[in-house]
Image: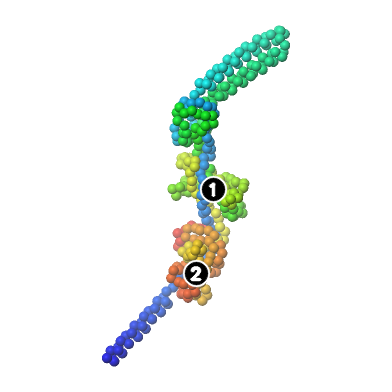
Amino acid sequence: MRKILMLVALCMLFCGTSCKSEKEKKEVETKFLVTSPIEKDTIITKDYVAQINSIRNIEIRAQEKGYLQKIYVDEGEKVKEGQLLFKITPSLYQAELQKAKAEADFAEIEYQNTKKLADNDVVAPNELAMAKAQYDKAKAEMALAQVHLNFTEIRAPFDGIVDRLHLKLGSLVEEGELLTTLSDNSKMWVYYNVPEAEYLNYASTGSKENTQVDLLMANNKEYDQHGVVETIEGEFNNETGNIAFRAVFDNPNELLRHGETGSILMKIPLDDALLIPQKATFEVLDKHYVFVIGEDHVVHQKEVKVGAEMPHLFAVENGLSENDKILLEGIRMVKDNEKINYEFEEPEEVLAGLDMYAE
């Protein structure tokens, strides 16, 4: 019995010693990959919610009252400048023009007769002047009647696309009533709002109008034309703290339409940016942290402020320096104030292994 107990004790001692050795060996062999932040010039892409407008988008309204007699176009149809769009019943205005013309003819006859008499000194010059004034007045009223008649034919003021038709054939149209809208989509104005701080950064870099931008459409595809920032509004919105930029895009295939939405993509240079891989960070309550390794190989959790985000990279505003060593891999395997063994990889080599683009 005593021999059996001694044998069991020896086995337990051997197993404990073996397990302890394996654990220590494992701890010795576990090495974490560490790197440092790198300072370099780069470019980030900022995106801004954008509203797309036609370079010209106007309301087509009736200028005279009457019944809608003809509709010559359909919704979404392309029209040319001067093309007839609508016709309002012209009968009343035609009658007014005929009446005005008859009165003008009568006034002309009166004027010619008075002129003959005045040439023979039969009537005073004042009577001739009165006859001439009556004739001029009649001609003006005839011209006005012609204008009213012309207003019954509504034509396109420029090349464009017809929007929704708001009235049907035969509808009674009031003066000033909306018939449709017309959009010139040859070029598009894209408006987007920039926060004050980003505007100041943009302006302080010497960037002015004519900066090239790109457009991300609602289907998450980039538009195949580059845009140019043409102008910046003169005042900030006091409620939002933003200022509006306007970029113009050519629209040769008329893919863009008035009222669309998208996102403007603007490339912004960052000088001497301090870059770290995103995978070296972790978040706690919307704050970013890294593990910094001290000279004693002990890791310390440290908060960093992220200034900009790029594919696979963060640009850090404060919290780190180029000389710091940060844990690159295995951040879920260590705890704050834990001592580790590590291998250091140069930041240039780390960046080269990331799927990103930086200058």
**Picture coordinates of residue 340 (x, y %)?**
46, 74
Q: Nearer the viewer, residue 167 or 322?
A: 167
Classify mark 2: helix, strand or loop. Answer: strand
Coordinates of residue 133 in the picture (x, y in percent): 66, 17
Disc sitting over residue 192 in the figure:
1
Instruction: Point out which mark residue 291 bears.
Output: 2
**Looking at the picture, does residue 68 appear above or below residue 187?**
above
Q: Total number of numbered labels?
A: 2
Q: Which mark is residue 34?
A: none
Q: Is 80 placed left or right of 131 in the picture?
A: left
Picture quarter with the N terminus: bottom left
Residue 244 as seen in the image, left or right of residue 116: left
Task: List x then y, in percent, for residue 144.
Answer: 59, 23
Residue for point 51% across, 52% down: 47
Front-most of 356 and 298? 298
Q: Which structural element holds mark 1? A: strand
